[in-house]
Amino acid sequence: MHIIYDGIVFEIQSQGGISRVFEETIPRICDLAPLAQIELFYAKPVRRALPQHANLNVRTLAPLEYYQQARLPKGRLRGLMRQLLFSAVSHSSKSIWHSTYYTQPMFWRGKKILTVYDMVHELFPQLFDAKGHEQNRQRKKQLIAEADIVLCISETTRQDIHQLYGTSLEKMQCVHLAYNATAFYQESIEDNGDARANEKLPTMKPFLLYVGTRKRYKNFSDVLTAYSTWRYRDDVDIVVVGPPWDNYETQELQMRKVDSKIHLLSGKGDDYLRFLYNAATAFIYPSLYEGFGIPLLEAMACGCPIVASRIPSSVEIAGDYPLYFAPGSEEELQVALTQQVEDGQKEILLQKGERILSHFSWEKTARGYLDLYTQLS
């Protein structure tokens, strides 16, 4: 078995769920298939650490400076480097190409697996109307048609592709993602109390937790609007983990007079994030659409209550664990938050969370990928 990964996601992501998928699965696949030939290529400097394993052959081309001597425009230079990468890949008709993010070599004789993470660009084109978005959508459609197997990270994504493009359900396989069970778990009340006393938290009030980027379909704007008129806003703060505020967000916070109640944290690792999940009154997940939802699993592992928009992927992954609200409904979001603050349900949630989480592990994900590679070998 010969598996070739294009590690492009490590070139374009400094953090994020997609790169984490391959960080977790590739070493496990190496363990599960010790006799397989497994290679990972990259064409330009990476922005985060690559997977490591004794059986993983990591290869690159000459440094970027070598190609810059050609004095090509930046876009053409990147394209040239990627095609040089593809041409350097030695393969046979039995080799398997698995790109980490929507690439495909020219004149490929082997099999091709394409991972599709979500269809948000296709379902919400009005949110992705910048130059190049339509071209990317058409390329993705072409890659789906040409792949031997389309690997979907959720049944939601699988059904979305089928409805949008009519792609055969038999051609598409669903393999769920997972979470880092070593990093995320419930901490003792005493540990949380000590952490609060040591001022590790940005607020001493009860708080709601939001994690990740905030733009477009992530729908943080509705959280901000609902919170600004919520009856408990003077009693409950919000802690946001994600990129710095932009100018528009800063103005919105000031205009709604909540800038002192919403606390932004950036550059935090899993240990601190685990502490926040454990300490939070509730985790808010307001997305209009998601392909999966790793933060849902992380929150459940810590016994953190969840208030989430009722979208297909969240129901698929989290079941009846969250309190749901209609996506885009600020009134329902306020009702759900009020119910969570007034009632609380941590003890009940622990039992629900254990049952749900038992279905997800990176070992299971890696084995699912290896099963697909075996089908094509």
Image (tube, grey):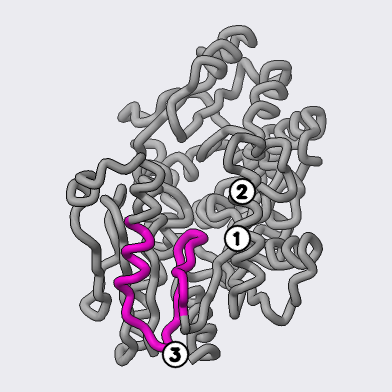
Q: Which amino acid does label 1 sit on?
A: Gly
Which residue is at a point 21% across and 77% down the rendered structure image? 54
Q: In which quarter of the image is the N terminus?
A: bottom left
Which residue is identified by label 3? Answer: 94
Is 218 within the magenta? no
Q: Residue 69's quadrant in the figure?
A: top left
Label 3 close to label 1 by CB (< 8 Å): no
Q: Which x, y percent locates residue 326?
A: 81, 41
Q: Which x, y percent locates residue 186?
A: 46, 53
Q: Which amino acid does label 3 sit on?
A: Lys
Q: What stretch is highlighted in magenta?
A: 81-108
Q: Residue 132's quadrant in the figure?
A: top right
Which residue is at a point 37% across and 72% down the rendered structure image? 26
* Residue situated in front as seen by the camera: 136 or 32: 136
CA distance for labels 3 and 1: 42 Å
Kind of element beneath mark 3 = loop
Of the two numbered discs 2 and 1 on the same chain, state the one appearing first in sequence: 2
Q: Which amino acid does label 2 sit on?
A: Gln
Is 103 within the magenta? yes
Which residue is at a point 50% across and 73% down the rendered structure image? 365
Which residue is identified by label 1? Answer: 353
Q: Nearer the viewer, mark 3 or mark 2?
A: 2
Of the two numbered discs 3 and 2 on the same chain, state the one appearing first in sequence: 3
Label 3 close to label 2 by CB (< 8 Å): no
CA distance for labels 2 and 1: 41 Å
Kind of element beneath mark 1 = helix
Of the two numbered discs 3 and 1 on the same chain, state the one appearing first in sequence: 3
CA distance for labels 3 and 2: 30 Å
Which residue is identified by label 2? Answer: 135
